[in-house]
Every structure is written in C-alpha cells, then in structure tokens.
Amino acid sequence: MSRVQEVTDERTQMDNWKWLGHRQHYCAASRCEFSLATLLPSGMLVSTIGDYRNPLNNEIEKIGAGRTFETMVFRTTGKFQPCGCPVIENWNEVEGRGYMDAKEATEGHMAMCRKWEKEADNG
C-alpha cells in the first residue's frame, strides 16, 4: 500500500470518529486544562486528560504515579447522556497510559484511537 493510500485510509477512518467536548473521565477533570475525548464507531471511548491545576495554588500536579497526563479507553453502552456524551459500560479502563507533557498525550491519544479502531475491526 502506498503512503498516499495509507493517509487517505486514515483520514477516512478519522471522519467516522466523534470528537466530544466534555472531559470524560477523572473525578477532578474540571481542574484539568487539557482534554481530548473520542468516541470510535466500535463504541470504544478514548479519553485523555491532564495539566491538572491544584485549586489552592494553581500549580500543575501529577494525576497518578509518574504522570501529569493520562489516556484511558472505556467500553460504552451505545446509549447517550442528555449532553450527548456516551454512557460508559464499566469505569474499569480497558487500557491506560500516562505521559508527562501535552505533546506525548496528544500523540498517545491518537495512537490509542488508531489501535482500538483496528482492534474492533479485527475483533
């Protein structure tokens, strides 16, 4: 397959992804200044948050062991909340990864989307 075909296939694939405006996981997500959330046609939700600000001093803090950003993948029920966000089937993530900066988090989010779209296609 040519590189042009690969790029065309990926763009077609991404056209079927639903980008969500609300943060999708983490109990203190409202204090995170970074978020990406993508619902894949397979029903898998890829959610990335980070850049958590401490409410007392507004300094960036880790959101888990050794990370300031994280991506998690969840199964959804196929139903939606009134705001349009998907209903999560189970809050135990299927996969998760941590990062230390926004660039890594963005790249990791996109990689998870591609991975879980392919896994759904093969499953």
Image (cartoon, rainbow, N blue to C red):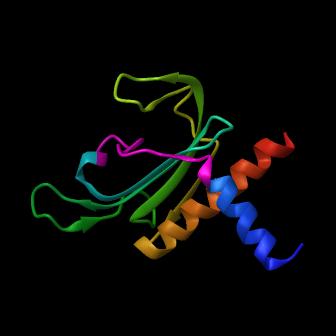
Q: Is residue 119 above or below residue 115?
A: above
- Displayed quadrant of residue 50: bottom left
Farthest-out residue, left: 56
Tell me: 47 left or right of 89.
left
Query: Residue 91 appears at what percent x and percent y?
Result: 52, 32
Nearer the observer, 47 or 61: 47
Query: Residue 10 appears at what percent x and percent y?
Result: 70, 62
Nearer the observer, 104 or 8: 8
Nearer the observer, 102 or 6: 6
Tell me: 114 left or right of 55.
right
- Displayed quadrant of residue 90: top right
- Residue at x-position 71% and y-position 70%: 7
Tell me: 108 left or right of 85.
right
Q: Is residue 33 above or below residue 21?
A: below
- Residue at x-position 51% and y-position 62%: 98
- Residue at x-position 77% and y-position 51%: 118
Query: Residue 106 appears at what percent x and percent y?
Result: 49, 67
Q: Is residue 51 above or below residue 29?
A: below
Nearer the observer, 1 or 70: 1
Magenta: main secondary structure equals: loop
Q: Quadrant of the C terminus?
A: top right
Query: Residue 68 appears at what percent x and percent y?
Result: 38, 65
- Residue at x-position 10% and y-position 64%: 57
Q: Which residues are magenta?
A: 15-29
Taking the magenta stretch, the answer to whether it contains residue 24 is yes
